[in-house]
């Protein structure tokens, strides 16, 4: 099954009003040739979601959501609020959320359900730590996260998976293409086993120190259907360079 790649930028806790110009530069550089290769999306901090979405230039996403619709949850943002602000996507289960906010697979699953309830596409992140990789536990860990973080009813239309080895995020380190292939093939098999043939269309992004110089090699790997890009999504030329790798 051929799957149109998605290159999604995760701006993390970066971006002020001045960053709107970078978003516009990304959109301006997203020409017909790039459009034929990949879809793009930007997940800015919550403060910029509405501003960027209102531009109508590219799909925008949140970086997290609360599982509930509304209520006494100071500082949190619901999936419905993101949708109302114009978001299309929401990242859930990023390793920084799993670590900084002790989010478990059950929490990530509830957030994925919240994303669907609001009409958002969930970008569900999984990935092993360095100790888990060197301990030979990568597939066990990723398999457990995939099983626990995805609700029944996961489809190619409502969910994107992002495989992000924790040790590769923001470090400049990346797994070998063979290691990426092993994990992506494994995730694909697990998805098809549980969700049936439709799961061949679920996009599995690779994330972790993707940049223009390594994107072509990583994106050429079987079952890699795009990238989740942190640092390199903050600069239009880098982000567009990654999209051009297809
Ligand atoms: C991320 O945080 O999702 C990420 C992949 O970061 P970086 O590209 O900076 O490693």
Image (tube, grey):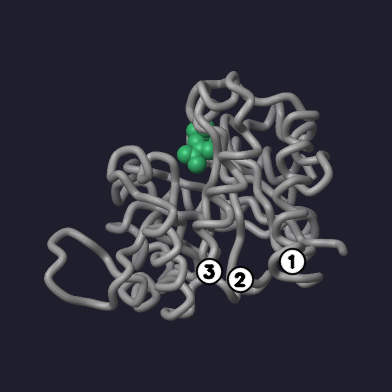
Q: Which mark is residue 148?
A: none
Cβ of mark 1 under 8 A from ligand 1: no
In the rendered image of this protein, does residue 64 appear above or below residue 185? below
Q: Name the residue located 57 percent from the left edge and 56 percent from the top edge.
A: 147
Residue drawn at the location 26% of the way across and 65% of the way down: 77
Q: Is residue 187 left or right of residue 97?
A: right
Q: Residue at x 74, y 29 (%)?
A: 179
Q: Which of the two residues, 191 or 124, is positioned nearer the viewer here? A: 191
In the displayed structure, 131 sits above or below 199; it is: above
Q: Is residue 9 above or below residue 32?
A: above
Image quarter hosting the C terminus: top right
Real-space Cα distance between discs 2 and 3? Answer: 6 Å
Identify the element where label 2 is drawn.
loop
Q: Which residue is mark 1?
A: 199
Q: Earlier in the sequence, mark 1 or mark 2?
A: 2
Residue assigned mark 3:
151
**Do the residues bearing badges 1 and 2 touch, measured as CB atoms within 8 Å?**
yes
CB under 8 Å between callouts 2 and 3? yes
Instruction: Give the camera-side residue of 104 and 66.
Output: 104
Q: Give the alpha-carbon distance from disc 1 to disc 2, as whole Å.
A: 8 Å
Side of 74 where 97 appears, left or right = right
Q: Which residue is mark 2?
A: 154
> Quadrant of the rendered structure where residue 86 is?
bottom left
Relative to 221, is 163 on the left or the right? left
Image-quadrant location for residue 39: bottom right
Q: Position of residue 11 (x, y in %)?
A: 42, 45
Q: Nearer the viewer, mark 3 or mark 1?
A: 3
Q: Using the rendered image of the protein, determine whether residue 109 is visible from the camera's viewpoint.
A: yes
- Which sits in the foreground, 124 or 218? 124
Q: Is mark 3 within 8 Å of ligand 1?
A: no
């Amino acid at each position: 099954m051929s799957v149109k790649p998605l290159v999604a930028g995760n701006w993390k806790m970066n971006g002020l009003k001045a960053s709107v110009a970078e978003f516009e530069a990304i959109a301006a550089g997203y020409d017909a040739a790039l459009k034929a290769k990949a879809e793009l999306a930007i997940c800015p901090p919550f403060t910029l979601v509405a501003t960027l979405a209102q531009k109508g230039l590219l799909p925008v996403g949140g970086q997290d959501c609360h599982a509930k619709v509304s209520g006494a949850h100071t500082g949190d943002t619901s999936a419905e609020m993101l949708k109302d602000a114009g978001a299309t996507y929401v990242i859930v289960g990023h390793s920084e959320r799993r670590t900084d906010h002790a989010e478990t697979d059950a929490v990530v699953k509830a957030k994925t359900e919240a994303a669907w309830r609001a009409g958002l596409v969930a970008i569900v992140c999984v990935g092993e730590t360095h100790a888990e990789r060197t301990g030979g536990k990568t597939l066990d860990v990723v398999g457990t996260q995939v099983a626990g973080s995805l609700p029944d009813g996961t489809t190619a239309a409502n969910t994107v998976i992002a495989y992000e080895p924790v040790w590769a995020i923001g470090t400049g380190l990346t797994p070998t293409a063979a290691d990426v292939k092993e994990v992506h093939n494994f995730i694909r098999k697990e998805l098809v086993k549980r969700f049936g043939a439709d799961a061949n269309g679920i996009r599995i992004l690779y994330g972790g120190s993707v940049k223009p110089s390594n994107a072509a090699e990583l994106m050429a790997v079987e079952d890699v259907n795009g990238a989740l890009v942190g640092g390199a999504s903050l600069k239009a030329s880098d982000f567009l360079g990654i999209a051009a790798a297809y």
